[in-house]
Image: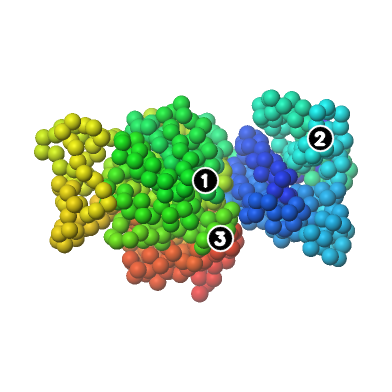
Amino acid sequence: MSSKPIEERASVVIRFAGDSGDGMQLAGSLFAAASALAGNDISNFPDYPAEIRAPAGTLSGVSGFQVHFASEDVHTPGDEVDALFAMNPAALKVHQADLREGGILVANSDAFTEQNLRKAGYAGGNPLQEGGLRSRFSVHEVPISSLNRAAVEGIENLSTREIDRTRNFFALGLAAWMFGRPLQPTLDWIANKFEKRPEIAEANARALRAGYHFGETAEVLDANIRVSPAPAPPGVYRTLAGNEAAALGLIAAAQRAGKTLFYGSYPITPASDILHELSRHAAFDVRTFQAEDEIAAIGAAIGASFGGALGATGTSGPGLCLKSEALNLAVMLEIPLVVISVQRGGPSTGLPTKVEQSDLLQALYGRNGESPVPVVAPATPGDCFAMAIEAVRIAFRYMTPVLYLSDSYLANGAEPWRVPRVEDLPEISVVHRTNPEGFLPYARDPETLARPWVLPGTPGLEHRIGGLEKQDGTGAVSYDPANHEKMCRLRAEKVARIVEDSPPLTVAGPESGKLLVIGWGSTYGAIRAALEPLWAQGKPVAQAHLRYLNPFPANLGEVLSRFKRILVPELNLGQLRTVLRSQYLVDAIGLAKVQGKPFAAREIRSRVLELLEA
């Protein structure tokens, strides 16, 4: 047992960084899983390089994974990093700015060669030897590569390349000692993952233990930090990422509705993991289709819905552009369909691995003609599950396509998630008309204005659908001007009526007063983390968060009217702000960020304090 003094902290933010081939995503995700099993509340976020084959050792090839674990509720992966594990000079250069003053820097000194220093742009020599770096941080030079090779030496059938690929487990083991993480969950994962390659399993396990024991015995390391478990309601918990949550939500909704789930998708970052996850669950009547392009993917999903399945498709901003014509077809057909857009930086290919709330205006207005579509947006990785179910419920109840806006921050981030009981999930009922008497394909339910959903081949209920305008009731092709206007208004009213069984907007903090901070999507955590310290000080600021973006909650206008000023933080140049100003005539103030990074809580808190003091 180590005799080094133990420091207790309420929360810690740790980041692993290195080349994209250094296994930093795996090390970070396993550290997060161990932290969750230790009882901490966690929030984590991976940072992928945009270039798949960026040269090793260069700034553009750096990959990172950040974990915030705490003995209290956490809402973000953290503003500043308490401990940075840098596997090479490029990782240090890219991430050093986020390391707090006095923070811990663990550097793989073996990688700080003249060649790697030059690739990273360190023309003046090794930064680890500079007094400036050591005066700001607690710097620990650890020869991770050579120590790891010594630990793994002697295992047969391993190449030098394969041996070096285990050094992420050495770093993970060292981090586990420094922060009191259990090794057993990771050892179990290694044994299961590499069951068919016992030599790889042994190498990774050796590297993990070697890193841990180095921390115990190395005199240069004085970091021995502990974070107590966080209080949580009783239940079964698991760590859940947003894309995984969305996939499980679609499966749960399909099961509740008694429907086959068909998911057609074309691979696109950062939505591809939804397809990958769903492809593992054929036992739950899930059918997945990797299409040759975005248009084929949504076309297949529309066909599945026409055939009586839950049709769904997923993409990101550029793919949503391509899907828009077929989405318009689904609007005209008035057929249930779920379209997921996991947003990323744009325009065009833009920043494919970086976060941005780029698709709101496209979701609301990015189709030709009068083409209303309901839009929902989850607020946290776990909420991706609930809002996927809600998107399906709306699609079935109102016979309409629904757009679901996630983003890469939610999709790749993860948090502890309390597994719900099946009986507590929302009821989703689906009725297919079978009685031919008085049947009209565009007759409408008086409450929802939904048209009947008839399965193909039902005797006596043959009918015509397509992209041309429909005659009210009969569904026949119609060019009558008055009928066209009537159908446009009916489709818009159908979507508007969704507000009648959607929850009202709630306010955290004072119910009225000087300032309301309103957001949508993944800004929830940063806003909440920014405001909680201000509430503790009695500051007159409130938070409201929109999960329903079309239609807005029925009481949104009334909520906005209770506050003198409205602040709208967004990871775009003001898309929600534009809509709020146009629909509610409020002088909303924008806080825009389009840097491919999520908000830091301090950025929002600083702007809030400025407005409160103005």
Query: Which mark, by number, is residue 159?
Result: 2
Q: Nearer the viewer, mark 3 or mark 1?
A: 1
Q: Amino acid at mark 2?
A: Ser
Q: Which residue is mark 1?
A: 267
Query: Which mark, by number, is residue 356?
Result: none
First along the sequence among labels 2 and 3: 2
Q: Is residue 569 above or below residue 529?
A: below
Q: Label 1: state its secondary structure.
A: loop
Q: Is residue 452 above or below residue 345?
A: above
Classify 10 Å Cα crowding around label 2: few (below 14), some (14-19), many (20 and above).
few
Along the viewing direction, whichever of 87 and 469 lies nearer the viewer: 469
Q: Tell me the CA gap for discs 2 and 1.
A: 32 Å
Query: Which mark, by number, is residue 350?
Result: 3
Q: How many marks?
A: 3
**Residue 221 x/y as whole percent:** 84, 45
Classify 10 Å Cα crowding around label 3: few (below 14), some (14-19), many (20 and above).
some
Asked if disc 2 and disc 1 are in contact, CB closer than 8 Å, the reply is: no
Q: Tell me the CA gap for discs 2 and 3.
A: 38 Å
